[in-house]
Image: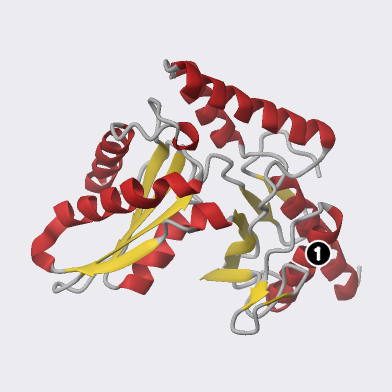
Amino acid sequence: MSQEQDVQRLTDTMAKFTAYIGKHLPTDVEAKLKELREKETKPLAKAVFMSMAENQEAAARLDRPSCQDTGMIQYFITAGAKFPLLGELEEILREATLEATRKAPLRHNTVETFDEKNTGTNTGTRSPWLDWEIVPGDDGATIDVYMAGGGCTLPGAATVLMPGQGYEGVADFVFDVISSRGVNACPPLLVGVGVSTAAETAARLSKKALMRPVDSHAHHPNAAKMEDLLEEGLNELGIGPQGLSGTASVMGVNIESSARHPSTIGVAVSTGCWAHRRGRIRINADLSYEIVSHQGAVL
């Protein structure tokens, strides 16, 4: 098979996968929503959870996106240095976004900044957004596809704390963000927290935290403990599904961190809505693939 044919094959795969995740929640998110629905005791919140489940069933049955806001497409790529189409991958994902927009269909959400013009294709300047990590020696690629909707993007915030504010300051910042703006993001939320040396590095990590499965834990035991404490505390706010009050405000809290400068604590928060539309696919060197995030998925 020629390289041109390989490029088209991978473009078709990624277009179908991108369209698919707009209509089907990942397995871990579906399981968490079911758990929260069964635990909910307030009648109105219970009814909201039931409507969420009915919405997902209808989206699958009718082959339609599960939310009218199909977001800005973002790809988080962990690619081997020996992946055969590494140099072509950026254009492949751009074309996949174009194709998914036409066929899914996806709402036109890409507006050129300062021009204030919708491109009508979900592509534009640095759009779709690509986040890269290169793995030496590997010949495959793992790609997380994320639909960043307007509502779940609105609470996003980052700052740099004085070192004396410590991890208590990190917790305070998370609570300030979720309590003041979390209701805009269609709860229950998956909360991604980045802790790093600067605002921009923390922000990147907070978004990558949203790619982790719900109920997963950070590798560092202190970070994992903080995840549990934040989840417990945020649920005590009683925001509830769609902000109408209830037992569950969040699906979980995921923390990603890096080493930092001793004089700074960068912290950022990103949120995913209840319809947390992200998917992970592993592409092998021969372009065969495995869908990691959606059990039993067929493209």
Q: Residue at x 14, y 74 (%)?
A: 263
Q: Nearer the viewer, residue 154 or 225?
A: 154
In the image: residue 246, left or right of residue 141: left
In the rendered view, would you say 89 is above or below 252? below
Question: Residue 246, how many percent across, how many down?
Answer: 40, 26
In the rendered view, would you say 44 is above or below 279? above
Question: Residue 7, how many percent across, how many down?
Answer: 83, 70
Which residue appears farthest toward the bottom when viewing the image? 115
Look at label 1 and name its amino acid.
Thr
Q: Nearer the viewer, residue 100 or 282?
A: 100
Q: Residue at x 29, y 37 (%)?
A: 228
Residue tagged 1: 11
Q: Residue at x 59, y 22 (%)?
A: 50
In the rendered view, would you say 54 is above or below 224? above
Question: Residue 202, how many percent across, how many down?
Answer: 35, 66
In the image: residue 72, left or right of residue 206: right
